[in-house]
Every structure is written in C-alpha cells, then in structure tokens.
Amino acid sequence: MGNSAESNTLDGTKDEAIYSKETAEQADEEEMKDTFDSDAEDEQQKKIMACGETVERMPEAYRNLLREVKVQLANDMEPGKVLLRMSPSLVFSTDDEEIIEAENTRMNKNKRLLEILMRKPAKAYESFKEALRADQPHLAGLIDNAEISNKAFQKAKDELERKKGFQEAGSQSEICRLRACLRENQAEPGRDDKLQITDLAQSWHKC
C-alpha cells in the first residue's frame, strides 16, 4: 500500500512536470508569435519610411474604442468579406491575410484581424468601417454609436483632422514654391509643367 501511495505521488509529480513543460512551450510559442508580429510591423514601417511617406499610427483612443466593441465584432463579423472589401486599400498584407485565415474558428479569425488592424496606420480604421458598412451595416453602426459617446476618440479624431489640414497646406505651399523655382530656372517650352516640377524636386536645394 505504501508502494502504491509512493507510485501515485511520483505519477502526480510527473504529470505536473509534463504540464509545466507544455505550458512553458506554449508561452514560448506565443512570445515568438508576438515577436514575429512586432518584427513584421517594424519592417513594414521601415519600408513605408523608405518610400518617403508619413504614417500616422492609429491613435490609442481609436484602439481603445475597437476594444470596447471587440466582443460584438468577434462574434458577428465575417472576416472573409472584410478582408475582401479592404483589399483595394492595401491595409492588410498577404502575410497578414494568411495569419488571419490560419486561425481555426471564425471568432479567432476576427480576433486576429482586429489585433492586426490596431497596429496599422490611422487610415486603416476608416477603411475597416467602410468595409463593414458595405456588408454588415449594423456593425458599422455599432462603432458609430460608440464614437459619439467617447470623448477621447473625438479628441483624437479632431487632432488627426488638424494634422491632415496642416499637411495639405504644406503640400500646397511646396507646390507653389516649386512652380516659382520652375519659373526662375526658365521652364522648357512645351514640356509638361508637372514633369518639370518633378525634375526640380530632385534638386530642391538649388532653389
């Protein structure tokens, strides 16, 4: 009987060791997955910056609002339709889509989609809403209603609009300066004005 008790104790210890090992391995896998996602995001940002684009990451207030409605979206959203609708906007890369589609249930696909969406630039939020509005307007309405009562979201939205206005004004000012530079450098007769501006932009320091 003593041997039986000792055997049970050993078996229990062995089971605990196996469980701990499996838990540790699962944690390592999750950590590696998060690291991979983070690295992929960093690489994407580097590519965008290399192209000379200014990217405004989705504000925290936007991400918090999506978290508020995450349960309803995860339960009811149709991920395939969302990805299809959003494909022209290039919000999700091919790798993103594969990661989402690899999930084993519709709910998990939706959770992964939202998780990746929150790491995208600010404009991805509006693209996402428009995709929902096309096929599942009640979900777009859910987000609209959440926005109305969320002061932090409204503040972040106003800030983005303000920055967008400054950027547009800056672009217009740059075009005017380029045109002036074009005149000073004696524009080539008959040549497209826009093409000459593009050429001059390459040697901006001369003006």
Image (spheres, rainbow, N blue to C red):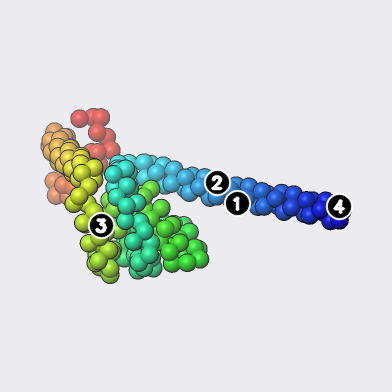
* Circle nearer the viewer, 3 or 4: 4
Q: Provide the residue designation for mark 1.
A: 26
> Which circle marks residue 2 in the picture?
4
Mark 2, residue position: 31
Nearer to us: label 2 or label 1: 1
Q: Residue at x 27, y 63 (%)?
A: 139
- Per the image, the residue denoted by label 3 is 143
Q: Residue furthest top?
A: 206
Q: How many marks?
A: 4
Measuring 38% from the left and 64% from the top, which residue is drawn there?
75
Q: Position of residue 95 (x, y in %)?
A: 46, 57
Rate crowding at label 3 as few (under 14), some (14 to 19) or many (20 or more) other CA atoms within 10 Å. some
Reading the chain from its start, which is encountered first: label 2 or label 1? 1
Q: CB of mark 1 within 8 Å of CB of mark 4?
A: no
Q: Are marks 2 and 4 in contact (CB under 8 Å)?
A: no
Q: Nearer the viewer, residue 13 or 88?
A: 13
| Image quadrant where one finds the C terminus | top left
The residue at the point 16 percent across, 47 percent down is 193
Q: Earlier in the sequence, mark 3 or mark 2?
A: 2
Nearer to us in this view, 93 or 109: 109
Q: Secondary structure at mark 3?
A: helix
State the quadrant of the N terminus: bottom right
Q: Nearer the viewer, residue 140 or 176?
A: 140
- Give the CA separation, mark 2 to mark 1: 9 Å
First in sequence: mark 1 vs mark 4: 4
Find numbered disc 4 in the image and state the secondary structure of the residue it sits on. helix
- Residue 63 rendering spot, x and y as whole percentages: 33, 48
Q: Amino acid at mark 4?
A: Gly
3D distance between C-alphas at marks 2 and 4: 43 Å
**Gap in Å between the C-alphas at discs 1 and 3?**
34 Å
Looking at the rendered structure, the kind of residue marked 2 is Glu
Earlier-in-chain disc, 1 versus 3: 1
